[in-house]
Image: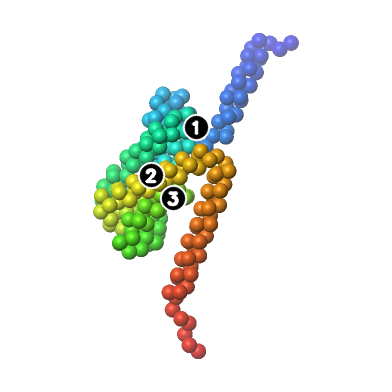
C-alpha cells in the first residue's frame, strides 16, 4: 500500500513536471517575462519595455512577448518602441569615451566591419535606417548606435535614423507575430531572397571593380 508521504511526494513530482512542461517551449523573451511576473512582480507593461531595451533581444523579442501576454497591439507597439529607444542616446554618448570603447572593443570591431558597407556620408542615414529597420540576425538599434558612432554621424541624425528603423522593425515584427507560423515562413523566404540578392549584387559590383588581369 502506498504511504501518504510517498503519495504526496508523487503528486508534487507530477505537478512540478506538468507546470514545467509548457515552459520548455518558451523562448528567451517569454522566460524573462515569466520570471518578471513570478519573481520580480513587475507589471506587464514594464516587463515588455525592459525586454525591448535589452541588447540582442530588443524589440523583436518584446513585441511577440507583449502579444503573448495578451496586451493590446497599440500598447505593445508603443511600449516596445519606447523601450528599445531608451538606451540608444546613452550608448551614443557613452561611446565618445575611450574607456567605454576599450571595454566594448570586440563588439565595436564587429560593428566596424558592418559599417564599411554603409557607403557615402549622404547615404549613411538611409543605410542605418534599413539596417535597424529590417529585423535580421546581427542587426538592431544597439548595433546601429555603434555603427553611427564609428561613422561619426551627428547624434540627432543618428537618433532619427535609428528611431525610424525601430518603428519599421516594430511594424514588421507585429505583422509577423499576428500572421503566425505561415507568415513567419513566408517572411523568412522573402528575407532570404533579399539577402541572396544583396550578396549577389555586392559580389557583381566587386567583380566589376576588380582590376583586369595582366596581359600575357
First along the sequence among labels 2 and 3: 3
Task: Indicate the colouring scheme.
Answer: rainbow
107 is higher (above) or lower (below) than 12: below
Furthest toward the bottom, the residue is 216
**Residue where numbered disc 3 is placed:** 134
Q: Nearest the camera: 36 or 175?
A: 175
User: Which residue in the structure is indicated by mark 2?
Assistant: 167
Q: Residues within 10 Å of mark 3 (few under 14, many from 20)?
A: some
State the image quarter where residue 75 is shown: top left
Disc 2 on helix, strand or loop?
helix
Q: Tell me if I can see residue 176 in this picture.
A: yes
Q: CA distance from mark 1 to mark 2?
A: 20 Å
* Quarter of the image where the N terminus is located: top right
**Cβ–Cβ below 8 Å for labels 2 and 3?**
no
Q: Position of residue 198 (x, y in %)?
A: 48, 61
Q: Position of residue 191 (x, y in %)?
A: 51, 53
Task: Name the residue at 45% across, 48% down.
Answer: 135
Numbered label attached to residue 68: 1
Amino acid at each position: 500500500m502506498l504511504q501518504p508521504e510517498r503519495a504526496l511526494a508523487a503528486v508534487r513530482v507530477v505537478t512540478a513536471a506538468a507546470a514545467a512542461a509548457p515552459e520548455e517551449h518558451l523562448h528567451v523573451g517569454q522566460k524573462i517575462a515569466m520570471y518578471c511576473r513570478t519573481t520580480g512582480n513587475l507589471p506587464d507593461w514594464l516587463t515588455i519595455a525592459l525586454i525591448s531595451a535589452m541588447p540582442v533581444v530588443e524589440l523583436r523579442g518584446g513585441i511577440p512577448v507583449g502579444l503573448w501576454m495578451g496586451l493590446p497591439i497599440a500598447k505593445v507597439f508603443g511600449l516596445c518602441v519606447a523601450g528599445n529607444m531608451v538606451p540608444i542616446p546613452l550608448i551614443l554618448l557613452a561611446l565618445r569615451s575611450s574607456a567605454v570603447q576599450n571595454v566594448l572593443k570586440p563588439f565595436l570591431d564587429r560593428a566596424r566591419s558592418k559599417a564599411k558597407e554603409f557607403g557615402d556620408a549622404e547615404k549613411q542615414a538611409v543605410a542605418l535606417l534599413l539596417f535597424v529597420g529590417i529585423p535580421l540576425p546581427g542587426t538592431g538599434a544597439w548595433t546601429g548606435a555603434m555603427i553611427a558612432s564609428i561613422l561619426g554621424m551627428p547624434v540627432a541624425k543618428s537618433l532619427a535614423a535609428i528611431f525610424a528603423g525601430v518603428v519599421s522593425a516594430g511594424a514588421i515584427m507585429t505583422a509577423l507575430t499576428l500572421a503566425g507560423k505561415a507568415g513567419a515562413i513566408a517572411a523568412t523566404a522573402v528575407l532570404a531572397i533579399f539577402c541572396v540578392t544583396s550578396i549577389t549584387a555586392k559580389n557583381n559590383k566587386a567583380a566589376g571593380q576588380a582590376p583586369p588581369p595582366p596581359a600575357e
